[in-house]
Amino acid sequence: MDEQIASVLEHAFPDREADAVHPSGPSWNEKNRTVKIDFADGWATYLKMATDGDGSRIVRERAALAYVGEQRTVSVPTVLVSDSEWEVPYLATVPVSGQNLIHLWSNASVSERQKVARQVGESLASVHSLRFENHGHIVGGDGDGIELETGPWTDVLIDTIGDMRTVASSDRFGHYFDDVVSAVETNRELLDDASAALLHGDLAQPNCFDTGGGIGFLDWEIAHVGDPVRDIHRTQELQFGSLRADAPEEIVSAFNDGYREQAGGFPPGFETRRPVYDAVRFLNHTGVFDKWAEFLDEPREELARWMDTEMQRRLAEIS
């Protein structure tokens, strides 16, 4: 317990006494902080705090959780209390029942992983079934609907790249943000033709949980309305691949089968737009080069040369 957590708990749960505070897991996003709180009366909550004071992410996640929860597309956490205008904006949710995917995956056989991958594909397709007339950023909403600040998909995508830049911890490859934005602009006609679907935006394994009958999704703070191809591609890499290696073919195939069966196929333009998202996705790696260099057991400059070559390759593949 520290002053920040104590102040938020006093505001959110003035009649409850906290018994223990637990870290929720590793994160490279320094603008947020999430902890699990055990209360003395046996209750518990996950408490997310916007440490930079920006409540827009809390508004976005609260709206997405309410809407998806009401539409019952996939299982999501239930919000207990939230205040996006408090000095430390926060969102408190009920702990979900079910095992986190990162733990489930580590002990699973290949066939078990295929089953889980298929379920992830099914759940993602269910989210993407929530369609909109326009692309845009989520600025509010509830169970009845999402409020959007609308714009062409290219502009929305460029805005999300700008958000990625603000959370980057290294400027070693900062110039690539400009290069990727330029490539996105060049493909405006191709991108703006995309469907407008609700996107989760960050389906890494820690943001998924097994409900016993499917896969539910956590952490909706960067949700937006955009091209489902971006979400599919990002999920394939986040869930099943690694920094240096592609995901096993049998696992990706299971994910793809689950998605296609639920959605009736991949979105039109999947292959033509995918190279753009390859480059956009890699900014998540170059932007935290310093953290990768600390995490991996390899020479720093060797990693830098590989990242440089890999981003150049991805940019060259964009027509």
Image (cartoon, grey):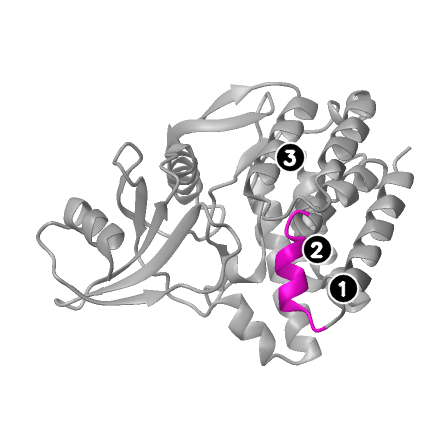
Where is the N terminus found, in terms of image quarters? bottom left
**Residue 81 on image: x %, y %:** 24, 44
Amino acid marked by disc 3: Ile
**Which circle marks residue 161 in the picture?**
3
Q: Magenta span covers which residues? A: 287-297
Mark 1, other Cα within 10 Å: few <14 / some 14–19 / many ≥20 = some
Describe the element under mark 1 as helix, strand or loop.
loop
Tell me which numbered mark, 1 or 2, is placed earlier along the sequence.
2
Describe the element under mark 3 as helix, strand or loop.
helix
Question: Residue 155 vs residue 103: left or right?
Answer: right
Q: Given the current orientation, which residue lies at the most extreme left position? A: 15
**Residue 68 on image: x %, y %:** 44, 42
Residue 215 in view of the camera: no
Does the stretch in magenta take in 293? Answer: yes
Mark 3, other Cα within 10 Å: few <14 / some 14–19 / many ≥20 = some
Q: Are dots 2 and 3 in contact, CB under 8 Å? A: no
Question: Residue 112 vs residue 207: left or right?
Answer: right
**Which circle marks residue 236 in the picture?**
2
The residue beneath circle 1 is 247
The structure residue drawn at horizontal position 64% and vertical position 56%, both measured from the top left corner, is 290
Where is the C terminus found, in terms of image quarters? top right
Residue 132 in view of the camera: yes
Q: Are dots 1 and 2 in contact, CB under 8 Å? A: yes
Amino acid marked by disc 2: Gln
- Name the front one of labels 2 and 3: 3
